Image: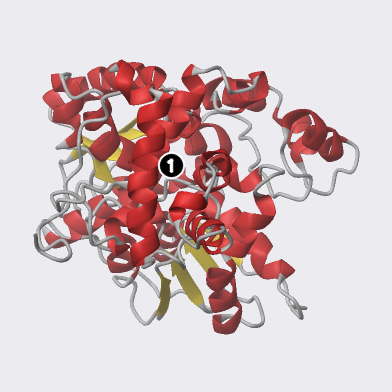
Amino acid sequence: MREGSLDAPTRHVVDWGNPDFVDAGRIDAELRRVFDICHGCRRCFNLCDAFPRLFDLIDDSATGELDSVDSADFPSVTDACTFCDMCFMTKCPYVPPHAFDLDFPHLMLRVRAAEFRRGERSFMDERISDTDTNGRLGTTFSPLANWALARKNRLTRPLMQSACGIHAEAELPRFNAASLVSVAAREPLEVNREAPAYPRRAVIYATCFSNWNDAGIGDAFRRILAHNGIETAVVHPGCCGMPKLELGDLADVAKRARTVSGKLLGWHDDGWDIVSLVPSCSLMMKFEWPLIAPDDGSVTRLASVVQDASEYIVRIARSEGLTDGLEPIDGPVTLHVACHARAQNMGAKAAEMLRLIPDTAVNVIERCSGHGGSWGVRTATFETGMKVGRTVMRNIARHDPAGAGVVASECPLAGLHIAQGVARLEGREAPAPRTCHPIQLMARSWGLEVRGAG
């Protein structure tokens, strides 16, 4: 047996339909096998809170080994996983095809799936994970919804904490006044026919976040593409299922994968490129969907053609070339490379993209923000998320002590979380820098007028 993994990592199909997959005894045995390997290695001690919790359980046990840790204490570890995939992608030397066959995130997914199958999810958990329903309601009643969600609202936020388990101090995203899909449909853009990339066409998968919460990201992207000679259409056949994945509802994820893949591939077959705006959704399409629905040809085919937004811009720059006119960005610029962008194994494409902007130094941070979807705003885990992200927040505070610059994060939720964390740093008197998506910074550099640009 070779020490460490010398081959490219691979992942197994998520066999969620097999009764053994959710069998409590088999899961406990696998948890003990994997936890014991992690205990002997400990390379992941500085990632998410799951590993320090595991190592503390072992170190504080009677024997100092896993054999004296009660399985009843394991949920403190499994509940701390945010599915960032960084242990699998960047730290663990024992991932498949190594003989130890260790995939920590997907083992945590198996635990969540078993909990879901046993009915260990509340009605409110289900509702929070239904982002499309929430989005439709939120955009329909956006003035009321945004008033209620505001962190400074001392009437509604304590009630939300009691009823929904959403921490009263967590910064929450606002809702659009109208969906990105509807805005794009009523405001078609003129395509620059003189641009090098003309006559490319791209269909933009809106994602729940840009469709319902921040249309500025999608608006910036379609204006960038139009400026560069690319005709666009914006669609949202449904959520990618990442919130359901976190919940453990894998049947729902598989259903969404089949539905969305079928709709998007119709565009691809007509000659359109397929681009996703948010890395978490891109990751689901490229990597998680094919493992959850491996027998669906549409799912596997989509995985091979979908591109992340930053990845797409870089590809155009390298092939046809971009339109001239990019101008420097004033003030300090920090890029937070989202974990789910790193997990796509495509390189730091957002960093490559922002380096196309002339005379603009970019402070690049490749570290977890500690948000992790709904995990980062829940009452039980909000402060833990702030702790996990503190390294990122301190880095930004050092780079921009006056708060005069901008932080671009590929994950919009991470951006909110980071800005709040910077403002909360001990001794910090300056405001936190503004936050935006890297795509919005590119639009700003070109001088394009867009909604919500950073």
40 or 95, which is in the foreground?
40
**Secondary structure beneath disc 1?**
helix
Q: Write the residue at 57% across / 44% down.
A: 73
Question: In the picture, residue 65 is in which quadrant?
Answer: bottom left
Tell me the amino acid under the disc marked 1.
Gly
Local crowd at mark 1 within 10 Å, few (<14), some, or many (≥20)? many
Which residue in the structure is indicated by mark 1? Answer: 218
Q: Write the residue at 51% across / 60% down.
A: 63
Residue 147 lies left or right of residue 42; in this view the side is right
Question: In the picture, residue 391 is in which quadrant?
Answer: bottom right
| Quadrant placement of the N terminus | bottom left
243 or 148, which is in the foreground?
243
Residue 406 lies left or right of residue 158; in this view the side is left
The x and y percentages for residue 69 are 52, 49
Q: Write the residue at 20% across / 25% down.
A: 299
356 or 50, which is in the foreground?
50
